[in-house]
Amino acid sequence: MVRAHARMNGVQASEATGKHMTRVLAVANQKGGVAKTTTVASLGAAMAEQGRRVLLVDLDPQGSLTFSLGHDPDKLAVSIHEVLLGDVEPDTALLETPEGMTLLPANIDLAGAEAMLLMRAGREYALKRALAKIGDRFDVVIVDCPPSLGVLTLNGLTAADDVIVPLQCETLAHRGVGQFLRTVDDVQQITNADLVLLGALPTLYDSRTTHSRDVILDVVDRYQLPVLAPPIPRTVRFAEASASGASVLAGRKNKGAMAYRELAAALLKHWKSGKALPTFTPEV
């Protein structure tokens, strides 16, 4: 059974020993168009605002996170592709972003890495090994997983302490959630026993429609999955931010940025003190 939400808090243990501990958060859902990349960039920017040293990892061959943070995937000298294959050290691929996060970028070469990794022993651990070399330089690592359940997503889940599932509040959004939860369960059984599923994050949420509420209630009922608060509202600011090469937090004040700042604060508090994450129940 997938372990969700509760854990013996590792941060408390690290504070007791005085040892620095990096938190690795995977953002994953094999369905595309659910705001994974927006969630990674926005949470990263919100945590950087709070003084955290943040590394964002683009694990998607489409390079959407890389592009949305102002870097051209087609002009990268080196990317996560070479890092996962062990051809270069991770720090040679790192890029800085205008909002203070560090980026491990991706481009279409990564699709080739997926095929090459399949032929290697321990292929699910490639990202975990890479992060072990640079992790102590960061407080938080957030991984943007591709819209698939292949070896790249398995790498993200194997390297992570926690995983969040963005869930688009639209028809058929729940399709594939059961399959994804089985994948999380497999990872917990085989490659990462400590992985904790924090819950689903409603995205593109419109509180005015009964449809958005119905989708969330259906997922809760069907999978007994915690739904994290606050839901991320639908706003045109997200598309504008991606096109500008910055996160939604960099622009004018807007409700999407406020929601991500609230979620980031809750995550940081959860990691520091073990305080339960707030959950969302739509009004019926």
Image (tube, rainbow, N blue to C red):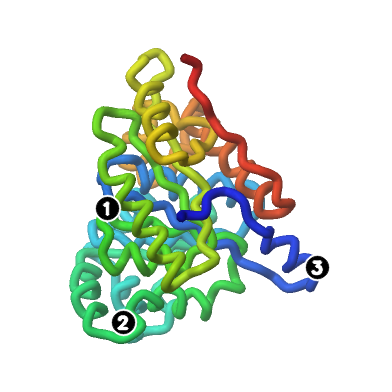
Residue assigned mark 2: 85
Q: Secondary structure at mark 2?
A: loop
Task: Tell me which amino acid carries mark 1.
Answer: Pro
Relative to 58, does residue 109 appear above or below in the rendering?
Answer: below
Relative to 165, does residue 195 appear above or below in the rendering?
Answer: below
Alpha-carbon distance for marks 1 and 2? Answer: 21 Å
Q: Residue at x 52, y 37 (%)?
A: 228
Left or right: where 176 falls relative to 208: left
Label 3 vs 2, first from the N-terminus: 3
Q: Secondary structure at mark 3?
A: helix
Label 1: few (<14), some or many (≥20) within 10 Å? many
Q: Residue at x 21, y 70 (%)?
A: 109
In percent of width and height, residue 93 lies at 39, 74
Relative to 117, does residue 171 appear above or below in the rendering?
Answer: above
Toward which corner of the image does residue 173 lie, by quadrant? Answer: top left
Residue assigned mark 3: 16
Task: Tell me which amino acid carries mark 2.
Answer: Leu
Q: Secondary structure at mark 1?
A: loop
Circle on res. 225: none
Residue assigned mark 1: 147
